[in-house]
Image (tube, rainbow, N blue to C red):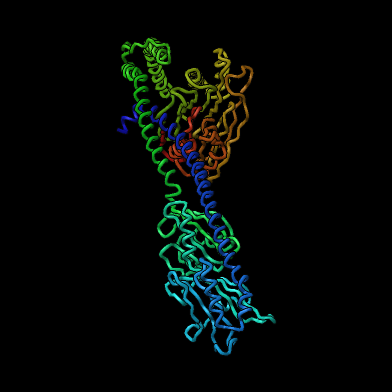
Amino acid sequence: MYARYNKSFSAKLSFYVISFITVLSVILFGIFYHYSTKTLSKEAEDKIETMAEIANLKVSALLSKVEKIPDNLGWMIMAYVENPDSLFSITRRIVKENEEIFGCAIAFEPYYFPSKGHYFAPYSFMSGDTVKTMQVGSEDYNYFEKGWYKGARETRYWSKPYRDAGDPDVITTSYAVPIHGKDGELIAVLSVDLTNKWLRDLANSMKPYEGSYTVIIDKQGRYIMRKEGETTIGKNMFQTAEEASEPNVARLVREMAAGKSGSLVVKDEKTLSYVYYTGVFATDWYMAVVCPYAQVFGKLNQFNMYMLIGFLLLLVFVYIMCFVAVRRITKPLTRFSMSARNIAGGDFNTPLPIIRSKDELGELYESFQFMQHQLTEYVEQLRNTTTANEKIQSELRIAHDIQLGMVPKQFIPPSGRETIDIHAVLRPAKQVGGDLYDYFMLNEDEFGFAIGDVSGKGVPAALFMSTTISQMRSVAMLDTSLNYIVNVINRSLIRNGNTSMFVTFFAGVLNLNTRRLRFCNAGHPYPIIIKPDGTVEMFKTADNLPLGVSSDYEYEEQECYFASGSQLLLYSDGVTEAQNEDAKFYKIDRLFQFIEENKNLSSKELVEKIIAHVDAYAGKAEQSDDLTVMSLRYEKQKGVRWL
């Protein structure tokens, strides 16, 4: 299927359209989801905040009322303080007239009433629908050590939740205030008890979503109320935060303990919950309303699911419609591709699908017709051109063979002469080139050699080269004087009328008896000489004009002693001007250094190593100049070796 898609233009175009629609839809869906979630979260927060504020007001009103009870009834205690038994009726009255109050106690200081002993604390509490009264102070219930009593000795005090002394099944929270005598001394602590039932009933009436519940803590983090069915005795919210693996639980506790308001998403046990928290007015309590996240954002998630399913169905529908429409529109392209293959196979008259429309397909039809006509003409011209090129290439190969056939390959010298070790290689940059070399015995005593480089490349340079070699051999047979040979060749080249070409030329004649070397350099690069002691030097010569430049110029030969064991290296500028892939030249310094490192080689070995070294330097760079290297070594021994 992938291969089919990879070859189908309609499938690709449909895929691109669907991809664009998908990316655009995902972006729009993301924006919609972000803002809808933000809006729904704000609505949920406002809803919960409103209900929390209403409950807050109710709780605050109730607690304020409870806090006023001791203030309003404190005078009664002072009025009846002379009759301790009458205090039981005061506690009964407080419980009976205030339905929010579960119990009321007036706990006196030790031996405040000598007749009552160390403990005296009249206490009334609700038991069902009746009010019971008792004295709760005893060795078993030492209220002096209770938190509500000790906390209220100095100031008003809300105690942490505890089990009531009168009914252990009831969880109670006490509000206690100190009672002072006429002289300001502490005589008793008045405490009113509230059960968590009224607070839970109030919290249960505040359920913005199904499964919601309310948590209330005091400023020490102690639970006043938790989830229904969970005990609050001895529980602390900071401890809960330490035990929880969810980091937002600890953050929620810190925010609530700091008295801040806000909302968080918290994982409550294994349920994700949305929590709104705020302080309870006029108290040191803090309230958090916990709502299941699914209840708050369930409708949004359900709507998003329906929207996603609809979106996927829409994408499938759009893809099918695009695929069918694009395939119908591009069907002629399939026929065009078949015609194009036939044309590529050489059938230039293959029929094309008929397109009558004036759109891009119509233009394609006209382009194919024009291409068929042009290809037919081009192929015919190509045949003619190929035939002509093959003829030219054949002639060039013949010319190449003829040119290389003009330079010497081997020569059998007269016997009894001292050895001349000579080797030369000529490699044209094209099939034919303008470099030349030659060597032969001029007579029984003299050995002649020459190397040259014609300006220019290709066939004209090759003709110029062949003319130079022919004239050199003809003139050398008449007179071995280099003055005569070089001047005659120069005038002959100019007389032929090709003023745009010239040749650098180095010719030498070595007398095998006297070891005198006569030479003439017409603008050619200086040779390099390896002396018998191994010293490598430039073979400096007089600077003359190249041949074919001026007919009035007179060339004169030079002469030196060529000791046995000397070796002369001659080369064309195709060696020193060879370029590498970075267009940098080989240069004479690199050649000179290479010869010093290989000065003990024979002529053949040295020439072949120089050419290999130049090729390695050039790498894959195409060379634009002919390359010629000749090495001549003169040795004092019988027998002559020619290579």
Q: Quadrant of the C terminus?
A: top left
Name the spot of residue 246 as percent of width and height, x first.
46, 60
Compared to 527, does 249 lie above or below?
below
x then y, percent, for residue 204: 46, 58
- In the rendered image, residue 90, in percent from the top left (x then y), is placed at 56, 75
Can the viewer see residue 535 in this picture? Answer: yes
Q: Is residue 98 left or right of residue 298?
A: right
Please count the marks in the image: 0
| Residue 637 falls in image quadrant | top left
The residue at the far right in this view is 183
Q: Is residue 412 visible?
A: no
Residue drawn at the location 47% of the way across and 41% of the way down: 33
**91 is higher (above) or lower (below) than 368:** below
Tell me where residue 282 sits by quadrant: bottom right
Q: Is residue 494 above or below residue 281?
A: above
- Direction from residue 362 to residue 540 in the image, left or right: right
In this view, the residue in front, 553 or 615, is: 615
In which quadrant will I find the N terminus? top left
Camera-side residue: 200 or 366? Answer: 200
Pick whichever, 293 or 380, lies toward us. Answer: 293
Between 425 and 551, the one lying in front of the other is 425
In-image side of 401 versus 279 (left or right): left
Percent coordinates x, y for residue 306 in the rendering = 39, 39
Q: Which quadrant of the view contains residue 496?
A: top right
